[in-house]
Amino acid sequence: MTPPSDTPCDASSEDATEATPPGFEADVKPLFRPFDHTSMINNGLDLWSYDDVKTNATAIYEQVSTGNMPCDEPWTPDKVATFKAWMDGGYLA
Ligand code: HEM
């Protein structure tokens, strides 16, 4: 007769797993090793700079998602996904 009145679940199942997009300092910058940083600085790209990585994000994504860069140790799908989520999430600092 009396329907249950509690509403135990208020989570939206659509975005429950990616509530907060990755940020550069906390999630993206640590993806780049000191060796990556040094190597690419010599090629005109500062991988530890938010502005440089944001400006070149599409080209960087192209390199890491195809396994072209870093040339000695391709990124795991997990790392590539973090970088993509950072782009899709609006390039949080
Ligand atoms: C815009 C994207 C990128 C371009 C166009 C690019 C291009 C290059 C070029 C031309 C070199 C020199 C290759 C040589 O001297 O034989 C190089 C080296 C290197 N890059 Fe990149 N790179 C990009 C992104 C990255 C990223 C995102 C990483 C790391 C996650 C990375 C890691 C490295 C490393 C470790 C080397 C040194 C390889 C070695 O000396 O054995 N690069 N890159």
Image (cartoon, rainbow, N blue to C red):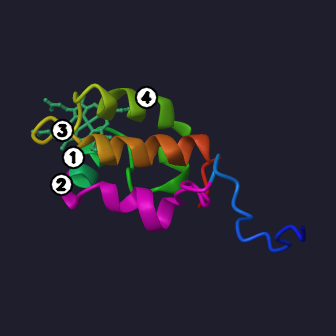
Residue position for label 4: 59
Ligand 1 near label 1 (Cβ, under 8 Å)?
yes
Tag 4 or tag 1, which sits nearer the N-term?
1
- Mark seen at residue 82: none
Q: Position of residue 38 (x, y in %)?
A: 23, 53
Whether the residue carrying mark 4 lies under 8 Å from ligand 1 is answered with: yes
39, 14: nearer the viewer: 14
Evaluate if marks 3 and 2 touch, with contact meaning CB atoms under 8 Å apart: no
Viewport quadrant of the N terminus: bottom right
Residue marked by disc 1: 39
Asked whether the beta carbons under mark 4 and mark 3 sit within 8 Å of each other, the answer is no
Task: Answer whether labels 2 and 1 touch (C-beta < 8 Å).
Answer: yes
> Which residue in the protein does label 3 denote?
74
Instruction: Indicate whether residue 53 is drawn in magenta.
Output: no
Given contact means CB atoms under 8 Å apart, are the residues at marks 4 and 2 in contact?
no
Q: Is residue 23 magenta?
A: yes
How far apart are the two marked residues, 4 and 2, measured between alpha carbons? 19 Å
Residue where numbered disc 2 is placed:
35
Left or right: 36 in relation to 45: left
Does the numbered disc 2 mark a residue whose Cβ is under 8 Å from ligand 1?
Answer: yes
Query: Which of the two labelled residues, at mark 3 and mark 2, occupies the earlier sequence position?
Result: 2
* Mark 4 / mark 2, whichever is N-terminal: 2
